[in-house]
Image (cartoon, grey):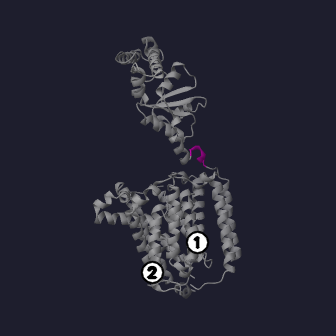
C-alpha cells in the first residue's frame, strides 16, 4: 500500500512542478482591490478647474487633458488644448498608447464628474500612474472661468486675485476669434461654430 | 464554459450534486463521529478527502487553462470581507464542534437517515433565519472591509502557480503527517 | 468481498473519495464557472419561505431584500437543485453500501438527547456563521481553495482553527 501511495504522491507533485513552470497570469497588472479603494479615497486625485486653467494658460507640457465624453459632444465644445478619448474606447490600443506616456499628467474631464471618474477608475485598474480628474468638469469650468463671478467689494484679496486670474484666462482662450480658431485643425464651419459658442458664452459671462 | 442552454442548468446542478453527495457519503461524511475524527486524531478522513479534492480540482483547472480549454481568470472568486469572514468562520467552527457536521455533510447524513444530521440541518435553517431577522445588528460588520474578489496569492505577493505548487506539497506533507500521527494515537471505537 | 462491501462499514479509500470529489468540483467550475455550495441553498430557501409567508416583512428586511431584488438570481435555484442532488447521491451511496438506517449517532458517553441538543445548537450556530462568512466549508473553503480565493481560505482557516479549539472544549460529546 505504501508504495502505491508513494507513486500517487509522486504523480501529484510532478503535476505540481508542471504547474510551477506554467507562465503565470499577469495578475499584477490589475491594482489590488484594497489599494484601489485607498486610491479612490485620496482627494489629491482631483484637480481644480483653476489649477488646470493655469496650466493650460502656461502651456504646461506635462499636462495631457483628456475629454472622455462622446465625440459629438467634444466637437460641440471642448476645453482648449484637450484631446478626445471617449470613455468606451479608453481601453483600445491607440488610446492606451496615448495614455501610457509616463512623463505626462493625465487629467480626465467630462460634463460633471461621473464619466471622468469612471475613466479614472478604469485607468487605475490598468495600473496607470499620474491620473487625475478635473473636478466639476466642463460645467464647473464654464461657471468659474467663462462666467466668472465678480466677488463682492469686501471679499478677500485672494478671492479678487482668483477672479482676475479667471478673467485673464477666459480672455486668453476666447479673447479673439483667431485664438479660438487655431487649436482646432479641421473644417472651417466647425471652427466658426466654436467661436460663436464661446463668444456667446463670453458675452453672457464675465469676459 | 457557460455554453449550455438555461433549461439544462438545473439538471446539471442536480447531476453534479449527485456526484458531490455520492463522493461524500462513500467516503464516510455521513457520520458525524467519523468527521470529528480529524480533530481528535483518530480518523483523518476530512483532511484527506478535503485536500485531495482541492488539489485535484486545482490541478485540473491549471492544466485546462494552460491548454486553453478553460480561462482561469473567469472563474468566480467569492468576495472577501475580512472581519465578517473571520467572525463567521469562528462561529461556524463552534457549530462544527457541537454538531459534528457542516451543511454539505449534514445533507448527506439526512440522505441515509441520520436523525442527528436532520436536526443539524433544521438548525441551519433556524440559524439563517435568526441572522436575517437580527441583520441590522450585524450589518456593519457584515459589510465592512470589502477587499473585493481577492486571491490569496495576491495577498501573499506570490504568483498563482507558486501558490498552487506549494499547496500540493503542503497537502502531500499533511497526508504523510496524518498517517504518522494516526499510528501513534489511541484507537477510538466509532 | 461483496458481503463486506454491503454491511455498512465499508468506506472507499479517502484519497479516492477526494479525487472523485475533486473531479466533481472541477466539472462544476468547468461547466458553470463557479464552485459547489451548500449553505447558499439554505439561505435561498429561508428567503423564499419568509417571502411567501410574509412578503412585506421580507421586502422591508434589509437582508432578505438583498436576495429578492436581484430576483432571478440564477445561483439560488442552482444551489437548491444541487442540494437535492447531494441528498440523492448520498442516498445512492448509502443504499449501495448498506448504510440506510434511522439512527442518532452519538458517542457512548452521552445520551441521544444530548447529541440532538448539541446538533441543534451546532446547526443554528453554523447557520449564523455561514451568513457572516458568505459560505460554508463546501462553498467557501473547498471551492475557494481550488481557485485560491482569499475569502475561502481565510474562512476555512477560521473554521478549522475554531473547530479544533471548541472540539477539545466539548470533547465529552465525541470521545
Task: Give whichever of B115, A98 is nearer the camera.
Answer: B115
Q: Which residue is mark 1?
A: C165
Mark 1 belongs to chain: C
Give the x, y percent position of residue B87: 51, 62
Residue sitting at x 42%, y 77%: B119
Q: Could you tell me which residue is drawn at 34 percent across and 64 percent down? A: C48
Picture residue at 43% right of the left edge, 31% below the top: A136
- Residue C48 is labelled as none
Task: Tell me where residue A199 sits by quadrant.
Answer: top left
x, y (%) of residue A176?
A: 43, 11
Above or below, comparing residue B89 to residue C9 in the picture: above
Q: Quadrant of the C terminus of chain C?
A: bottom right
Which residue is labeled 2 in the image?
Answer: C116
Q: Is residue A38 above or below residue A205?
A: below
> Could you tell me residue A85's position as x and y percent?
48, 30
- Looking at the image, residue B148 lies above or below residue A178: below
Q: Quadrant of the N terminus of chain C?
A: bottom right
Q: CA distance from mark 1 to mark 2?
A: 21 Å
Taking the view exactly as shown, the residue that stands out farthest to the front is A154
Quarter of the image holding residue B128? bottom left
- Nearest to the observer: residue B148 or residue B175: B148
Host chain of mark 2: C
Apparent side of residue A179 relative to residue A193 in the rendered image (left or right)? right
Q: Circle 1 sits in a helix, a strand or a loop, which is it?
A: helix
Magenta part of the protein: which range? Answer: A25-31
Q: Of the residues under marks 1 and 2, which one precedes in the sequence?
A: 2
Mark 1 or mark 2, whichever is nearer to me: 1
Amino acid at each position: 500500500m505504501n508504495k502505491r501511495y508513494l507513486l500517487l504522491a509522486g504523480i501529484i507533485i510532478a503535476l505540481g512542478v508542471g504547474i510551477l513552470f506554467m507562465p503565470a497570469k499577469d495578475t499584477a497588472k490589475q491594482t489590488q482591490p484594497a489599494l484601489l479603494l485607498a486610491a479612490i479615497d485620496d482627494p489629491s486625485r482631483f484637480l481644480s478647474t483653476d489649477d488646470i486653467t493655469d496650466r493650460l494658460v502656461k502651456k504646461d507640457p506635462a499636462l495631457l487633458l483628456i475629454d472622455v465624453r462622446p465625440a459629438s459632444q467634444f466637437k460641440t465644445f471642448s476645453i482648449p488644448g484637450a484631446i478626445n478619448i471617449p470613455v468606451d474606447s479608453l481601453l483600445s490600443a491607440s488610446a492606451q498608447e496615448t495614455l501610457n506616456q509616463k512623463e505626462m499628467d493625465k487629467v480626465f474631464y467630462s460634463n460633471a464628474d461621473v464619466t471622468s471618474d469612471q475613466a479614472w477608475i478604469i485607468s487605475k485598474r490598468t495600473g496607470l500612474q499620474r491620473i487625475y480628474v478635473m473636478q466639476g468638469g466642463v460645467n464647473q469650468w464654464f461657471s468659474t472661468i467663462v462666467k466668472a463671478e465678480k466677488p463682492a467689494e469686501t471679499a478677500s484679496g485672494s478671492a479678487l486675485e482668483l477672479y482676475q486670474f479667471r478673467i485673464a484666462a477666459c480672455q486668453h482662450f476666447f479673447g479673439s476669434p483667431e485664438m479660438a480658431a487655431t487649436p482646432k485643425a479641421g473644417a472651417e464651419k466647425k471652427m466658426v461654430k466654436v467661436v460663436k459658442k464661446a463668444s456667446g458664452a463670453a458675452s453672457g459671462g464675465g469676459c | 464554459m457557460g455554453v449550455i442552454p438555461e433549461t439544462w442548468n438545473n439538471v446539471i446542478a442536480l447531476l453534479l450534486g449527485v456526484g458531490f453527495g455520492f463522493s461524500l457519503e462513500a467516503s464516510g461524511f455521513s457520520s458525524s463521529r467519523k468527521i470529528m475524527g480529524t480533530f481528535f486524531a483518530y480518523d483523518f478522513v476530512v483532511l484527506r478527502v478535503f485536500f485531495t479534492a482541492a488539489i485535484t480540482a486545482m490541478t485540473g483547472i491549471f492544466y485546462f487553462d494552460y491548454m486553453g480549454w478553460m480561462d482561469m481568470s473567469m472563474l468566480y472568486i467569492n468576495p472577501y470581507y475580512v472581519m465578517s469572514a473571520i467572525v463567521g468562520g469562528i462561529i461556524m467552527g463552534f457549530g462544527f464542534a457541537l454538531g459534528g457536521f457542516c451543511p454539505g455533510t449534514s445533507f448527506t447524513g439526512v440522505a441515509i437517515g441520520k436523525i442527528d444530521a436532520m436536526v443539524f440541518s433544521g438548525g441551519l435553517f433556524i440559524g439563517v433565519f435568526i441572522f436575517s431577522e437580527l441583520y441590522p445588528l450585524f450589518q456593519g460588520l457584515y459589510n465592512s472591509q470589502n477587499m473585493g474578489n481577492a486571491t490569496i496569492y495576491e495577498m501573499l505577493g506570490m504568483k498563482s502557480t507558486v501558490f498552487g505548487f506549494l499547496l500540493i506539497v503542503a497537502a502531500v506533507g499533511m497526508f504523510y503527517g496524518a498517517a504518522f500521527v494516526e499510528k501513534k494515537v489511541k484507537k477510538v471505537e466509532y | 468481498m461483496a458481503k463486506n462491501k454491503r454491511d455498512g462499514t465499508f468506506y472507499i479509500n479517502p484519497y479516492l473519495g477526494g479525487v472523485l470529489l475533486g473531479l466533481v468540483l472541477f466539472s462544476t467550475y468547468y461547466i458553470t464557472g463557479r464552485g459547489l455550495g451548500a449553505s447558499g441553498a439554505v439561505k435561498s430557501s429561508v428567503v423564499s419561505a419568509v417571502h411567501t409567508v410574509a412578503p412585506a416583512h421580507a421586502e422591508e428586511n434589509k437582508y432578505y431584500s438583498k436576495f429578492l431584488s436581484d430576483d432571478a438570481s440564477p445561483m439560488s435555484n442552482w444551489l437548491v437543485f444541487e442540494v437535492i442532488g447531494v441528498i440523492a447521491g448520498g442516498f445512492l451511496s448509502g443504499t449501495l453500501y448498506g448504510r440506510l438506517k434511522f439512527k442518532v449517532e452519538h458517542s457512548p458517553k452521552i445520551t441521544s438527547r444530548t447529541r440532538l441538543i448539541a446538533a441543534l445548537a451546532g446547526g443554528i450556530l453554523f447557520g449564523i456563521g455561514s451568513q457572516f462568512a458568505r459560505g460554508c466549508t463546501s462553498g467557501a473553503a473547498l471551492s475557494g481553495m481550488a481557485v485560491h480565493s482569499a475569502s475561502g481560505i481565510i474562512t476555512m482557516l477560521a473554521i478549522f482553527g475554531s473547530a479544533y479549539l471548541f472540539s477539545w472544549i466539548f470533547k465529552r460529546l465525541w470521545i
